[in-house]
Amino acid sequence: MAERRALLREANAAVVAQVRGFHARPWAPGDADSVVQEFVCECGDVPCVATVRVAVGVASSAPVLAPGHG
């Protein structure tokens, strides 16, 4: 389960990097950390396919978990 959580965290980190990469351009509007994106739940349960819409800043600072998942 720990390996699965790590892979899910890595997938979410890639989304964070992509959004931040876009907003690093001088012509990009807004703040990358306030952009709301869909991320995969990082609970690690094999049957879990939940997604969570949160701000990039939130996803970069803590594991993304669907409500009720731990």
Image (cartoon, grey):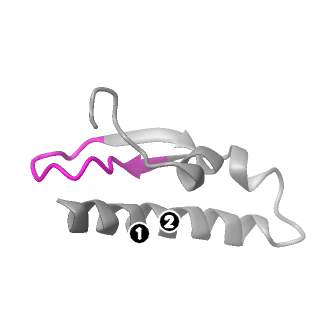
Other residues around mark 1 within 10 Å, as few (<14) / some (14–19) / many (≥20): few
Residue hosting label 2: 13
The magenta stretch spans residue 4: no
Type of the residue with mark 2:
Ala
Front-lying residue, 16 or 1: 1
Q: Residue at x 28, y 37 (%)?
A: 70
The magenta stretch spans residue 42: yes
Residue found at the far top of this picture: 68
Other residues around mark 2 within 10 Å, as few (<14) / some (14–19) / many (≥20): some
Query: Of helix, strand and loop, which one carries label 1?
Result: helix
- Would you place residue 69 above or below residue 38 in this image? above
Residue found at the far left of this picture: 47
Badges 1 and 2: C-beta atoms under 8 Å apart?
Answer: yes
Location of residue 20 by image quarter: bottom right
Q: Write down the region rendered in magenta.
A: 38-50
Q: Position of residue 68 (x, y in %)?
A: 28, 27
Location of residue 26 by image quarter: bottom right
Q: Position of residue 23 (x, y in %)?
A: 76, 64
Q: Position of residue 27 (x, y in %)?
A: 88, 67
- Would you place residue 34 above or below residue 69 in this image? below
Q: Which quadrant of the rendered structure holds the N terminus? A: bottom left
Q: In the visual, does 31 lie left or right of 66?
A: right
Residue hosting label 1: 10
Q: In the visual, does 60 lie left or right of 42?
A: right
Type of the residue with mark 1:
Glu
Q: Residue at x 82, y 72 (%)?
A: 25
